[in-house]
Image: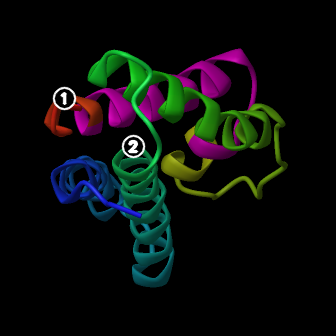
Amino acid sequence: MQIDRRAVTAGAGFGLLTALGPWFQGLPLAAAAGFAAGLFLTYTSIGLLVGILPDFGHRVRTGVIIGLLYSIPGAVFTAVPYPLVEDAPAYYREFVGGGPRALLLTLLFGSLAGAVAGWFRKTAV
C-alpha cells in the first residue's frame, strides 16, 4: 500500500491550524488540549485517507468526498444538543449546542480538510 505523504502532511497542517482555536477560548488547559488533539487527529486522519484511498478521477473532488463521508458521524454527533452548566465557556456551548449549524460546519470543515489534502495529493499516473 502506497501512502501519499503530501496528502497526509496537508491534512495534518489543516488539523494544526484548526487545533489552535481551542487554545484562545479561555478553556481550562486539559479541555483545550483535548479539543485541540481531537481536531488535529480528525483532520490528519482525513489526510491519511486521501493519501491511501484511490483517486476518483480528480484529486480535490476525491478529497472532498472522502472528507465529507468521514465527517458524517461527527456531524451527527455535534448536531445533538448536550446540556451544560450555566457557567460553561462559550466555546463548549458552540461545540455542543447542536442543531443544523453544528452539523453543517462539521461537514464543511471535513470537506475542506479533504479538499486541501486532495490538492496536495500527487496526480495519479
> For residue 50, which numbered disc appears in the image?
2
Q: Tag 2: residue type? A: Val
Q: Secondary structure at mark 2?
A: helix
Q: Secondary structure at mark 1?
A: helix
Q: Tag 1: residue type? A: Trp
Q: Are marks 2 and 1 in contact (CB under 8 Å)?
A: no
Is 107 drawn above or below residue 94 in the view shown?
above
Horizontally, residue 70 falls left or right of residue 15, namely: right
Query: Residue 109: horizontal and vertical position, in percent?
Result: 43, 31
Is 46 drawn above or below residue 85 in the view shown?
above
Q: Residue at x 46, y 50 (%)?
A: 49
| Label 2 neighbour load within 10 Å: few <14, some 14-19, many 20+ | many
Identify which residue, 21 or 76, lies in the foreground.
Answer: 76
Identify the main secondary structure in magenta. Answer: helix
Q: What residue is disc 1 on?
A: 119
Where does the magenta region start and end? 95-117
Identify which residue, 82 or 89, lies in the foreground.
Answer: 82
Identify which residue, 35 or 44, lies in the foreground.
Answer: 44
Task: State which quarter of the image contains the C terminus.
Answer: top left
Q: Earlier in the sequence, mark 2 or mark 1?
A: 2
| Label 1 neighbour load within 10 Å: few <14, some 14-19, many 20+ | many
Q: Residue at x 40, y 51 (%)?
A: 43
Q: How is the image coloured?
A: rainbow
Query: Residue 32: horizontal and vertical position, in percent?
Result: 42, 70
